[in-house]
Image: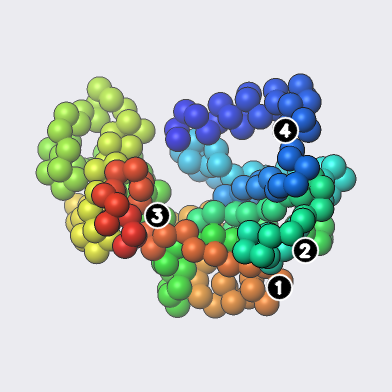
Amino acid sequence: MRLVSPMLRRVVYPAMHYGGWLKKSVPSDGCLVVNYHGVIPSGSYSRHSFLDDNLVSSAVLQKQLEFLKAQYNVIDAEAFRGWIVKGGNLPSRSVLVTCDDGLANNLSEMLPILQSESVSCLFFVTGESCREQAGVLWYEELYHLVATGQVPDQDLQAIFEIDGLNLRQRGVQATWWSCVTGASRFKRSLRAEKIGLLRTICKSTAPTLSETRWTLLNVRELRQLARSGMSIGAHTMSHPVLAECTEDEALQL
């Protein structure tokens, strides 16, 4: 994820576009899906910019939506669902726009652009967003806690039941990702408990993740998205790395 996503976005996909491969690959009787993860809020700044690699700026989103409308037939989630369930035909060169994770900037930054372009989006959100007070994506909070340097390597090893961590030698990103894969093997409640323990260890140095870049949509904001004509889908309860979960655990998460 840390290396492949930027490579795809900055090298592979542009090469496919300018080489004409994407146009040739569009099935005449199918549908392509263009997936986003949100928009970088205006004035947002992060010392850990790699965490923003799956986000786009407002200007880029606007430009891409204009391109999709000019070159493809953008459909909504209901048309896509009808095609999957009932069969039938979609317009040629159909595209469905989706957005994962349910960050608060989906409402504050992304929705106005979607509305200005009259484009419907299917937002996939986690169970965390079905609450009055939504939190943050646990793995992003985990990164900021690890990056404080306040948690000794031996504590990270014990908490997440992983071996061989050495923050100084491996660096923050590699250490964090080992913790993410380890934490994904736990049940949701246990994972939340362990991250809470890290907050206690970090004490006053723990980051405050309150801006729209980090916080998740809450249930009131989800209703606002739905009233605006957008569709809502499920994106697991807690967004673990499913490849690290057993099949039974994955069905519960």
Query: Which of disc 3 and disc 4 is earlier in sequence?
Result: 4
Query: Which of disc 2 and disc 1 is earlier in sequence?
Result: 2
Which amino acid type corresponds to the residue marked 1 in the rendered image? Answer: Ser
**Of 73 and 205, which appears nearest the observer?**
73
Residue 183 left/right relative to 216: left
| Residues at marks 1 and 2, CA–CA distance in whole angstroms | 8 Å
Residue identifier under label 3? 239
Q: Dot 3 lies on which element?
A: loop
Residue identifier under label 1? 228
Residue 192 in view, yes or no: no
The image shows residue 146 at horizontal and vertical percentages of 29, 42
- Mark 4 and mark 2 in contact? Answer it, CB < 8 Å: no
User: Looking at the image, is 251 positioned above or below residue 53?
Assistant: below
Q: Dot 1 lies on which element?
A: loop
| Residues at marks 4 and 3, CA–CA distance in whole angstroms | 31 Å
**Of 82 and 210, which appears nearest the observer?**
82
User: Looking at the image, is 6 positioned above or below residue 184?
Assistant: above
The image shows residue 249 at horizontal and vertical percentages of 27, 56
Question: Which residue shows up at 27% across the image and 57% down it?
Answer: 248
Residue 54 numbered tag: none
Residue 115 numbered tag: 2
Question: Which residue shows up at 62% across the image and 64% down it?
Answer: 85
| Foreground tag (4 vs 2) | 4
Query: Which of disc 2 and disc 3 is earlier in sequence?
Result: 2
Q: Dot 4 lies on which element?
A: helix
Query: Which of disc 4 and disc 1 is earlier in sequence?
Result: 4
Which amino acid type corresponds to the residue marked 4 in the rendered image? Answer: Ser
Query: Which of disc 3 and disc 1 is earlier in sequence?
Result: 1
- Mark 1 and mark 2 in contact? Answer it, CB < 8 Å: yes
Question: Which residue shows up at 82% across the image and 47% down it?
Answer: 92
